[in-house]
Structures are given as C-alpha cells and as structure tokens.
Image (spheres, grey):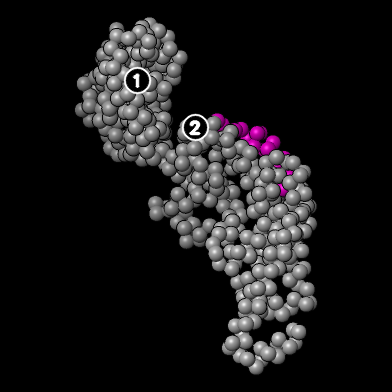
Amino acid sequence: MALTGGSWEVQEEVQGQCSRLAAISLEFKEESEQWEFDHGDSNTGLLDLSDEVFLLILSRLDPASLLRLGSTCRTLFRVGSCNSLWTKHFQTSFGVQFATASCSFSAKSAFRLIFMWRTLFRNLHCNRSLQEKLFAQIPLPPHKYWIQWLVLEETVPLPSVRLPCTDIEHLWGIEKTVLDCELLDKVDDEDGGMLTFEWKELNALALEHHGSIAKVFHHVLNRQQSNDHCELEAMFSQYTQYRFQWLFTYWLFRQPAPFDRQLRAIFLQWQKPSKQKLGCWGAASCDVQYLASLHPITTDFWRGMLARGDETVGIQILENYFSMCKSLLAWILGRDWGGLKRQKVYKDTLDGVYLLLRREMWDTLVCHERFWQVAKVQMARVCTLEETAANYVNWKMIETLPYYKLYMVSGNAVYLDHVQAFLRRKRVVHDWISMNENSWVRQLLPADLFPLLEFDTKISQGSLHGDSMPAQLSRLIWLYSHSGQQLYLEAVKGLVLQCAQASLGHFCSLSPGPVIATQSHVS
C-alpha cells in the first residue's frame, strides 16, 4: 500500500513538524527532480548511488528521519520504502518480528497503522474522541474495527466483552475447537449464545492459539487489510494537533483527589491569577491555556517545546518540576523568614532553575534530583542577592536588572558589584533631588517626572522609548545608573532644572503676582 501525501502529513504530525517539513520537502523534491532531469546519467551525484549503498545509509536513520528523507524525491521514496528497513523499525518499536511472507501489508504500511493505533491507545486516558468510540456503546461491544485493534493489547480498560463464537473466531483467530467445555460455561443462552470474556483472558487465548505475539500481529493486520482506515487517520491527526492541550488538561484536572488538591495548591502558589478564570477550575469552560501561561515551563509544554516535542516525556518533566516545587516550598516554609522573603526566595529560585535548565528540558527528561541540585544553588544565589540589596525594597528594585539574572545564571561575584554600584547611583539621584535647595524644583516638577527621581522607582525597558519628557529622563537615569558616567548625571540635573523652570514660566504667565513672589523667594 503506497504512502499517500495525506498519510505522509499524518506521520509527520507525529513528530510535530508537519507544516515546516511539508514546505521543505516539496521544494527539495522539485529541486531533486530537476537535478535528475538536468544531469541525466551523470555519475557524480548523490542520487546515482546504488540501491545497496542507499540502504546502508538509510539503515542508520530513525523512522521519522526515514520518512522525511523519503518525501524529497521519487528515488529516495522508493528506496526508503524498502521492507528491510521497516522490518527493523517494526521490531525495534513494537518488539515483534515482521514476516513479509505471512502479512498482506508491506512493512512500512504495517508500521504506519500500528504506530497510529498504539499512539492513540496509550493516550486513551486523555483522548475523549477515542473514549467515545470504545465506551459509548456499553454494555454492547465497540465497533468491530476497533475491537480488532484491541486484540493486540494485553490490558484493555473496558468491561468484559460479550460476543458470539463466530465473532471471537473472526477477530481473535481462535477456532471453535479451542472454546471447549470449560469455556462454554460462559455462554449466555438467553442472549443468543453470547460468550463473555475478560479482555486479558481473550488475549491469552489468542496468544496460546497462534503460538506467538508476532502471529497475533500478523492475524490482525491481515484482517485489517480490507478495512478503511480514514477514521483512524483522522483521529490520529486530531490527536497530534491537540495532544499537548489534552495531556496538560488531564494532568492538571484529572488526578486523584489528594494529589489533585496538592497540585492545585503548588500550581497557584504565590501566583496572582484572575479569580474569575480560577472560578471554573476543571470545568469545561475553564481557560486551560491561561493556566498554562502562569508558568514558563507549562507554557513551553503547551507549545510543544519540552523534550523535543515528545508529549509523554514532557509530562514527566512537568511532574518532576512541580514535585520539586513541593519540596522547595516545604523547605522555605520551615525557615524563620517573613512572608515577603519566603515568597521572593521561592519565585526567584524557580526563575533561576528555569533559566539554567530550560535548554536541557527542551532536549530530554530532567530528573527530580537534577532539579533539586540546581535549586539549592539558585536559592543560595538568591539569598546572596538579598544580602547585597540590604533590604526588601532594594531587593525588589534590582530584580529586573540584567546583572541580577546574570548572577543567577553564572554566580560570578562581579555582577554583585554591578548591583551595588547601581543602588549607589540611584541613591545619588535621590539625594540630589531631596536636597533643601531643590525644594522649589520638587514643587514645580510635573507629576509624571518627580517619581522617576525617587530611589525605589523601577525604570522598565518599555519606558525608555519615545521623545516625551518622562522617556528622556528615564533614559538618562538608566544610562547613569548602569554606567556611572558623570556626564549622564549632569544631563539628568540639567533636564530636571529645565523642566522646573519651564513650569515656573508657565505659572508666571498664568498668575503673575504669586509667581513673582515665588521667584523672589527662590532668589
């Protein structure tokens, strides 16, 4: 069975790269075909290698890479569909030897179908579409198409199956002679001779009858040859599109009651989420994407960035992360600290852990021990930054500085010196505007300028842009605070005095009498 363009896209969605690879593959395919046309029988190109050499090269690729390469041109598609390549992947992925002679499918097509089924079945807990197919008709069995796939599974989370002997023989390949007198006790004469079996029991009977799990696989594939698999492909496509959202929703809302309460408490610990959106926690109307946005690590999972897009490993990373959060919180609450310090140590430590480990988490699973090892280092650095800041007000003010994050990542003490110098320069600006001789300046400065000169005012990156007076003053204070160059301090003073004198002139034009008195007083 040839792999169609639509099926290729479905397989690519397994790897989470469909949209990007489709464009690349089409372009590369056109270039390769043009190259073949232009070069004819030339012996200087990659496509002129013998099939044997191609097979040696392609045998080193994983299934996803083999599919990607096979989409580039006709030659690579033909060689990449070779049974010898996919037989190896079939055995590696499913633990079953594939016998081409006894199966009506090619190894590639068989791999594709079973891979789609296994992926859907192993994520049945969060896949409502498949649940409806398998559970909706209880107490009657599911559609025979889905029962045929269930034959491959040893453990099936469904009630006992009730089928006539003919269906059991057709689906499992168990001959009537095997259903001996002992099994006839299961016959329900009042219901047309229906047999009732546990799924695991039927699986054991099928395995005993066929002799090996490989023969069970071949029996199922042969039975599936005449079936239309469009529904399976559509469900697989839907799952690959929404798998991160489904898995995250299940993980956050469908845990056992004690763990569910703990997870919710840790997930919302010291967060400031919308109470309106939290009011429908776990309900169908809940904004799950909003909840995922509360943490950078859950945001990464929602976007498919953890563990190279492997949703199963990504969920394990989330579990390890929030397990570490629970341990960290217990440790912090056991310290004799104030509430504000506990909160900031907790949040800054987790921010530092994320900064250091996000690259690792994007590639592979990071265990709880690794999380806690990094967390202890980050917590020590947070406490050092607190000591450097000297008080909570300063500590809150420096958290947006680049030096703060650089020290959290590197631990280099030179960044502590930069933090201290920043605080000293902020104090210089504050002390200057607070001098007695500048009292008239404080009175005349516009309301949007004076707060910028106060010591505990944060200057955000967004406020540095534009031609307005607040933007100009913010830039000058920012440049002086970070560089320490005196010319920027003088520029700050000059701009402040200029604004105060402009306000004085404005008042003079509006109220000549009182302002003249003020001018005399200033003089």
Q: Is residue 230 left or right of residue 442?
A: left
Q: Mark 2 near mark 1, Cβ–Cβ under 8 Å?
A: no
Quadrant of res 166: top left
Q: Position of residue 518 (x, y in %)?
A: 70, 87
Give the dominant element type of the magenta stretch: helix, strand or loop.
Answer: helix
The numbered mark at residue 70 is 1
Q: In terms of depth relative to the viewer, which is nearer, 206 or 372?
A: 372
- Considering the image in quadrants, where does the N terminus appear? top left
Q: Residue 438 lies in magenta, yes or no?
A: no
Side of 328 relative to 390 (left or right)? left
Q: Is residue 406 visible?
A: yes
Q: Which residues are magenta?
A: 364-382
Between 161 and 211, the residue placed more toward the observer is: 211
Asked whether 381 falls inside the magenta stretch, the response is yes
Q: Which residue is mark 2?
A: 308
Residue 33 left/right relative to 286: left
Q: Is residue 87 visible?
A: no
Residue 470 in the image: state x and y as whole percent: 59, 67
